[in-house]
Image (cartoon, rainbow, N blue to C red):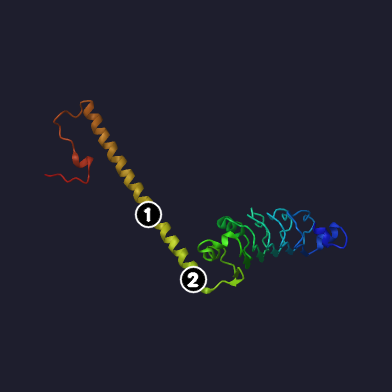
Amino acid sequence: DPYSCLSFRSDAQASVKTELHLGNRGYTRLANFHAFISLDQLWINNNKLTSLAGLENNFRIKILLAFGNRIRSLNGALRGFKFLMQVSLADNALGNLNETLEDLSSNKYLHTLDMFGNPIAQEDNYRLLVVMKLPWLVTLDRLKISEEEREAVMREAEQRVHARYENLERMERMENEEELEAALKERYAAHRAAADYGDVGIGTEVDQQALHPTVRDPK
């Protein structure tokens, strides 16, 4: 209960409170934060939280320290926190890197992020993928993002763009080949239909060049 940090239980006092330290309380969920509308620093570390639901009214938070919990997913809980600058989610249970980065992609002022000790931090190219999705970060997992890492991100981005254009060109070629094949089949079917109805008699020479443009007329 965040009101436990106040000298007396009052929504008026809660509305001007800017910092709360609620670590090591054994909390399993977040509740009763709706009146703390001025909150900009929140410590909820080393509890038993499985989500960050319950902070919807606290979008002014700039520093959120939620390390040492059991959080498996952000589920969009921080998307409206446009002033967020520092987040620690270390030693939780975050398991989907793409989903987590998507949830944080709207926090443009976020410069310090700690996700050390989560399953996602063990994924291949973890730091590269995080910096690629959140290029405004300065520090990741307590290490400053180096210029070499940013250059690697640029190279990876260029390779992905190049590969995307190659795939588009390949698909266009396939579509053109499919259109040509469909046209040839249609022309062949038309000739067969004409032969069936007697428009092309037996012995009548079929225009092989028309049916198969790649076949040269022996004449």
Q: Where is residue 60 in the image (x, y as percent from the top left)?
A: 72, 61
Residue at the left extreme, as displayed = 219
User: Which residue lies at the image location 43% right of the left edge and 57% below the top edge?
Assistant: 164
Q: Which mark is residue 126?
A: none
Give the quarter of the image for residue 111: bottom right
Residue at the top extreme, as displayed = 197
Q: Residue 151 carries which label?
A: 2
Residue type at tag 1: Glu
The one of 8 and 79 positioned closer to us in this rendering: 8
Q: Where is residue 183 in the image (x, y as percent from the top left)?
A: 30, 40
Q: Earlier in the sequence, mark 2 or mark 1?
A: 2
The one of 121 and 173 positioned closer to us in this rendering: 121
Q: Residues within 10 Å of mark 2 (few under 14, many from 20)?
A: few
Q: Position of residue 147 (x, y in %)?
A: 52, 74
Q: Are marks 2 and 1 in contact (CB under 8 Å)?
A: no
User: Which residue lies at the image location 15% right of the left edge and 32% below the top edge?
Assistant: 204
> Of circles 2 and 1, which is in front?
2
Left or right? Give the position of 60 relative to 107. right
Left or right? Give the position of 105 relative to 210. right
The one of 138 and 1 positioned closer to us in this rendering: 1
Which quadrant of the figure contains the N terminus? bottom right
Q: How crowded is mark 1: few (under 14 residues within 10 Å), some or many (20 or more)?
A: few
Give the quarter of the image for residue 19: bottom right
Q: Position of residue 54 (x, y in %)?
A: 73, 53
Q: Mark 1 points at which residue?
A: 169
Left or right? Give the position of 126 relative to 46. left
Question: SS class of the residue under badge 1?
Answer: helix
User: Which residue lies at the image location 26% right of the left edge and 37% below the top edge?
Assistant: 187
Give the quarter of the image for residue 163: bottom left
Left or right? Give the position of 159 relative to 54. left
- The Cα–Cα distance between marks 2 and 1, rounded to whole angstroms, is 27 Å
Residue type at tag 2: Glu
